[in-house]
Amino acid sequence: MNEPDVPRRRVLVAITGASGAIYGWRLLHVLRGTPDIESHLIVSPPGWTTLRHELDLGPDDLRLLTDHLHDVNDLGAGPASGSFRCHGMVIAPCSMRSLAAVAHGLTDNLITRAADVMLKERRRLVLMSRETPLHLGHLRNMTAVTEMGGIVCPPMPAFYLRPRDIGELVDASIARVLDLLELPHTLSRRWTGLPRTT
């Protein structure tokens, strides 16, 4: 049976075990309020650990923010196939383990398989990588993913926007991701240059 036409754009969000679970959580909030978006979520076991530790959130909380919550071990789920039409995928945050798996085509769970699908189908894949400092292996994995067509987008704080709190710092990073996905938002002011002095 053929899949019916999909009127809404699907966006796949993955949360892995790096610190920064708030990025995935906030992205889901924004997608929830974006018209014509169908969100799909995959969380790794370390991702659930980080969500509980950093935000006191569990599966029941995340189910409220997404249209579909997939089991990370379900390699038979829709996102594992190239025929599953998807506008883009964001790994937020992306651990160095997940980055390495994507860089080397190791598709041992639904997150890494879905990321591999995005690359082979030439669809937008954004990795909000979280680690510091970086060793040469991390940098080489980032290069490999970039050469395959993925976008490595570490959440760097934009202090020139003069953020008033952590929420504004997070929103500035999520705004960059939404721009990469070509999705509308009003999360953050756009830079128009320094004010003129007289």
Image (spheres, rainbow, N blue to C red):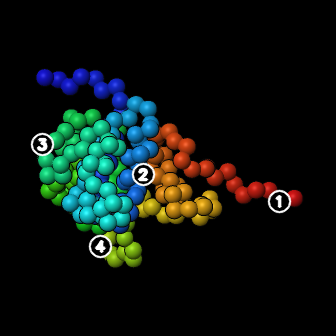
Q: How many marks?
A: 4
Q: Which residue is mark 2?
A: 26
Tag 1 and tag 4, C-beta contact below 8 Å: no
First in sequence: mark 2 vs mark 3 = 2
Q: Secondary structure at mark 4?
A: helix
Image disc number at residue 197: 1
Look at the image and tell me whether residue 118 can be seen: no
First in sequence: mark 4 vs mark 2 = 2
The residues bearing labels 4 and 3 have C-alpha atoms spaced at a distance of 31 Å
Image disc number at residue 30: none
Q: Is 72 situated above or below 166?
A: above
Tag 4 and tag 2, C-beta contact below 8 Å: no
Q: Secondary structure at mark 1?
A: loop
- Mark 3, other Cα within 10 Å: few <14 / some 14–19 / many ≥20: few
The residues bearing labels 2 and 1 have C-alpha atoms spaced at a distance of 37 Å
Q: Which residue is mark 3?
A: 76
Q: Which residue is mark 4?
A: 137
Residue 16 lies, in percent from the top left, at 28, 59
Which residue does the image show at 32% across and 43% down from the upper left?
A: 64
Amino acid marked by disc 2: Arg
Residue 60 lies, in percent from the top left, at 27, 48
Amino acid marked by disc 1: Thr
Query: Quadrant location of the C terminus?
Result: bottom right
